[in-house]
Amino acid sequence: MYNDKRLHQLWLNCQYRQRYQPLGEIIAPLRTKLKDNRNKHLSQINAIWADIVGVDLADLAFPYDVHSGILIVSVASPAVKFTIEQIYRQAILDQVCEQTGKRLKDMKCTLSTNRAN
């Protein structure tokens, strides 16, 4: 026969199962909200990226992150990285500043091809 303590444990277990929610369901809205708040500037840059660099270069490079005023651009090859960093860096920063109204300190390129967005 069950004693009072065991009945209480069973009751708590039933209550826990009724309130159970998978962790993914709890975190997903929070993750989306944090990502949206953090990357509002990045989404603005993504929207105008092809206009700034041109369609051909936009296929080979895309804005990956904005961190502490530094635009991080993901590029497909070292040649594209050199082209962007050495030739187009200041023009891209000027265009981004002009079209978004936000000032960026610098731009860095990283070799990566997986689009996270």
Image: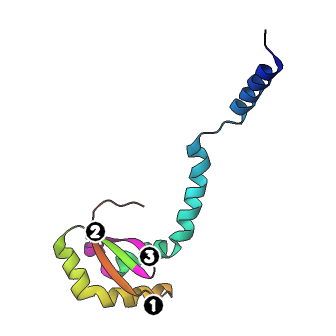
Total residue callouts:
3
Secondary structure beneath dot 2 equals helix
First reached walking from the N terminus: tag 3 or tag 2: 2
Given residues 18 and 36, the one toward you in this image is 18
Q: Residue furthest right?
A: 4
Find the distance from the CA under tag 2 to the CA under tag 1. Answer: 22 Å
Query: Residue shown at 19%/80% (left/top)?
Result: 82
Asked whether, in this view, residue 7 is left or right of residue 17, the answer is right
Amino acid type at mark 2 = Asp
What is the crowding at mark 1: few (fewer than 14 residues within 10 Å), some, or many (at least 20)?
few
Residue 87 quadrant: bottom left
Q: Circle 2 sits on which residue?
A: 59
Q: Is residue 63 magenta?
A: yes
Amino acid type at mark 1 = Glu
Q: Nearer the viewer, mark 3 or mark 2?
A: 3
Amino acid type at mark 3 = His
Question: In the image, is residue 34 above or below residue 102?
Answer: above
Q: Is residue 77 magenta?
A: no
Asked whether, in this view, residue 38 is left or right of residue 117, the answer is right
**Image position, residue 56 (x, y; %):** 25, 73
Q: Residue furthest top?
A: 1
Q: Circle 1 sits on which residue?
A: 98
Residue 67: mark: 3
First reached walking from the N terminus: tag 3 or tag 1: 3
**Image position, residue 31 (x, y; %):** 55, 57
**Image position, residue 26 (x, y; %):** 62, 47
Query: Residue shown at 57%/69% (left/top)?
Result: 37
First reached walking from the N terminus: tag 2 or tag 1: 2
Q: Which residues are magenta?
A: 53-70
Question: In the image, is residue 6 above or below residue 117?
Answer: above
Q: Residue furthest left?
A: 79
